[in-house]
Image (tube, helix red, strand yellow):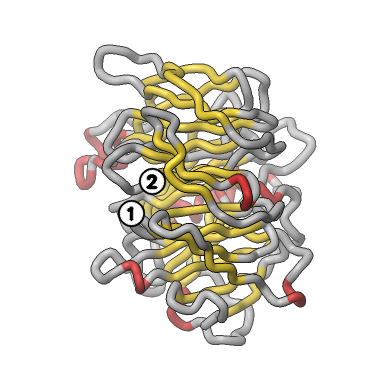
Amino acid sequence: MDISSDESDDWFMESLNAYKDLHLFQLEHPTKVIEWTGDKNICVAGYTGARSEILELLLPLKLYAGENQGLCAERDFKVQHGGFSEEPVENLIHIPGTRCAVTSGSSSSTLQIWDIGGDDSDVIKRTGVINLKSKSATGSKIAPGLTDEPAVLHGSCISDVELTEIATGRVLHTVAKESSDSVSGLQFVNACVFLICTSNGTLLMGDTRAPSTCHYPLEESKSGLHWSFGLRSDRIQSEASCTVARLSSSGHILLSDLRDLQSMFCQTQIKVQHSASNNDFLNISWAPVLDRCLSVSGFDGTVHIYDTMDWSTEGQSPQPVFSHRGHEMSHEGKHCDFPPVVTTHSWHQSRPKTLLSAATDGSLHVWDWVDKITDR
C-alpha cells in the first residue's frame, strides 16, 4: 500500500494521543526474531545476509522513566553485546535463567549454541552445536525446555522433533510419529507436556514421560492454508486452562481449549487485504498480562490487537482494539520497491500494553498503546 506524505504526517500527529510511548529504531539488517533476555533486554539477528549479526539490545531507558521521562535523554536502543553467525538466523531462543541462546539457520544441519556474554565481555560467542536429523530451508523450529537442566525442543518436520540437552547433546525425547508434515511452531505447556502446530494446522500434544503423541488434524475445508499458533497459559491456575490460537495465511483464527483440542470453542475471520506473502512472518501471540487479548501480524506493515472477550463461535469479522501502523507510516520516503511487512512482534512479559515489532525494511519499534475505549 502506497502511503502519501500527508497520510504519514497525519498518523504522526495522531500517534501523540494513540501511544504512551513510541520509539523507532533502524537495524542495519532486518530481523525475524525478537527474543527477551531480561526485563529490559532483547536479542535480534539478521536473516538476509550470508553472515548475520546477532545483537543484544537494551530497550530505551526513557520507556522506564515513568513520570520523569522529561529528565531521561536515552530514547534509543543501546547495543550491549554482539556477534556474528555464519548463516542467516531463522529462529532464535533464549534459555531462561541463563546467558545462553540457541539459533537455527536456513539449510543448516545444526543448531548453534551461543553465550550472550556478561559484564566482562561485549561479545556473543558460539560455544557449540546440536546436530539435526535433516536440513530445512526455513530452519528448524525451536523452543526452550522448562526443566532444571537447559534443553531445547526442535524440529523442522514432525518425525524430526526431539528434545536435546544443551550441555551434553543427549537426546532426551523423540516424537514417535512418522510424518513429513512441516512444523510451524512448538512450545512447552509445562515441564513435560508440549504442543506442536504443523503448517497445515494440525496440533500434536506430546509428553516427555510417554512415547506416544496425540494427533488433532483440522477438517479438510481448512486445508491448503498455512497455519501458525500461539499458546496462552493461565499462570494462576493449572496448565489445564491453556488456550491455543491458530492463525491461517488467509486470516482465519481458531481458538481451542487444551482439554479439547479436537474442537474449537471460537473461530473467526479477520479482515486482511491479501493472504500472507511469506508464511514465516505469520505471528499470533497472546498478551501475557491483558486477559484474552491477542495480537496478529505478518500480512502487511501492521500489528493488530484484538480483544477476544466478545468473540462468538461463528462471529462476524472482529475489529481490532488497536492497530500499530508505524512501520508502514515511517516507511514513507524510503527508497524501497515494496512496502514493509512486519516480520515478528513480541509482548513485554510484565508491562501490559508494551510490544516490540520488526519489519522487512529493518525497522524496530517498541510501543505502549492506549486503549481509547476502556483505557485499561
Relative vertical location of residue 273 with respect to residue 341 in this rendering, above or below: below
Relative vertical location of residue 41 with respect to residue 79 in this rendering, above or below: below
Q: Is residue 111 left or right of residue 166?
A: right
- Residue sitting nearer the eye, 332 or 116: 116
- Please tell me which residue is depicted at 59% across the width and 22% down the height of the picture: 52
- Residues marked 1 and 2 touching at CB (< 8 Å): yes
Q: Report the residue marked by disc 2.
A: 145
Which structural element holds mark 2?
loop
Q: Quadrant of the C terminus?
A: bottom left
Q: Report the residue marked by disc 1.
A: 191
- Please tell me which residue is depicted at 25% across the width and 18% down the height of the picture: 119
Which structural element holds mark 1?
loop
Residue 70 in which image quadrant = top left
Residue 96 in which image quadrant = top left
Q: Residues within 10 Å of mark 1 (few under 14, many from 20)?
A: few
Which of the marked residues, 1 or 2, is nearer the chain's N terminus? Answer: 2
Q: Residues within 10 Å of mark 2 (few under 14, many from 20)?
A: many
Q: Amino acid at mark 2?
A: Gly
Relative vertical location of residue 366 with respect to residue 313 in this rendering, above or below: above
Relative vertical location of residue 368 with respect to residue 60 in this rendering, above or below: below
Q: Position of residue 250 (x, y in %)?
A: 72, 65
Q: Position of residue 370 (x, y in %)?
A: 39, 61
Is residue 368 among what the camera can see? yes
- Please tell me which residue is depicted at 68% across the width and 51% down the height of the picture: 182
